[in-house]
Amino acid sequence: MFTKVFSTLFVIAATTAVVSAGGRLTLCTDVNMTGHCETISYLNNECINLGSALANEVSSVDPEGDGHKCYLFVNAACQGDHFDFTKHHDDIGVYEDRANSFYCNNAN
Ligand SMILES: *[C@@H]1O[C@H](CO)[C@@H](O)[C@H](O)[C@H]1NC(C)=O
């Protein structure tokens, strides 16, 4: 009886840990989270290349929830110069319309 309860709880905890090893990032083509926006699910430290609707177009970013560390790169495959952020930015400044890939982690 107790063994079964504990093993069930363990399975739930393990599943939750896997599901939460990542997060969601919204990217928009215009400042202030306007224009074309996409919300992309990521796994921690997984490099994601932006699709054609966002590549070289991103102007604002909004990680969902807390604890994100994100790196938005000017080249594909998370190469080159990068804009580093942990929270919502209505305007990514000199990186506007230059991003082609990102990775994030929310492990901290
Ligand atoms: C973005 O939001 C700021 C603060 O609300 C505002 O001052 C600015 O005019 C907005 N920019 C655009 C392009 O909508």
Image (spheres, helix red, strand yellow):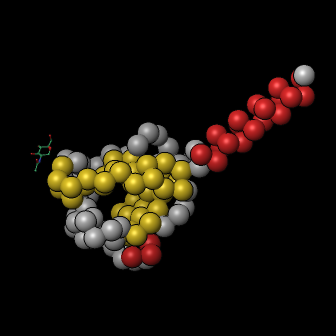
- Which residue shows up at 35% across the image and 51% down it? 39
> Relative to 5, is 93 on the left or the right?
left
- Closer-to-camera residue (1/16): 1
- Which residue shows up at 49% across the image and 48% down it? 23
- Asked which quadrant contains residue 14, the reply is top right
- Asked which quadrant contains residue 12, the reply is top right
* 2 vs 7: above or below: above
Q: Quadrant of the N terminus?
A: top right
> Relative to 70, is 6 on the left or the right?
right
Is residue 86 visible in the rendered structure shown here? no
- Closer-to-camera residue (91/76): 76
Figure disc tally: 0
- Which residue shows up at 39% across the image and 51% down it? 25
* 100 vs 36: above or below: below
- Which residue shows up at 27% across the image and 64% down it? 54
**In x, y percent, where is residue 67?**
50, 44
Ligand 1 positioned in quadrant: top left
> Relative to 81, is 13 on the left or the right?
right
**In x, y percent, where is residue 90?**
23, 48
**In x, y percent, where is residue 30?**
17, 56
Is residue 90 visible in the rendered structure shown here? yes
**In x, y percent, where is residue 33?**
22, 48
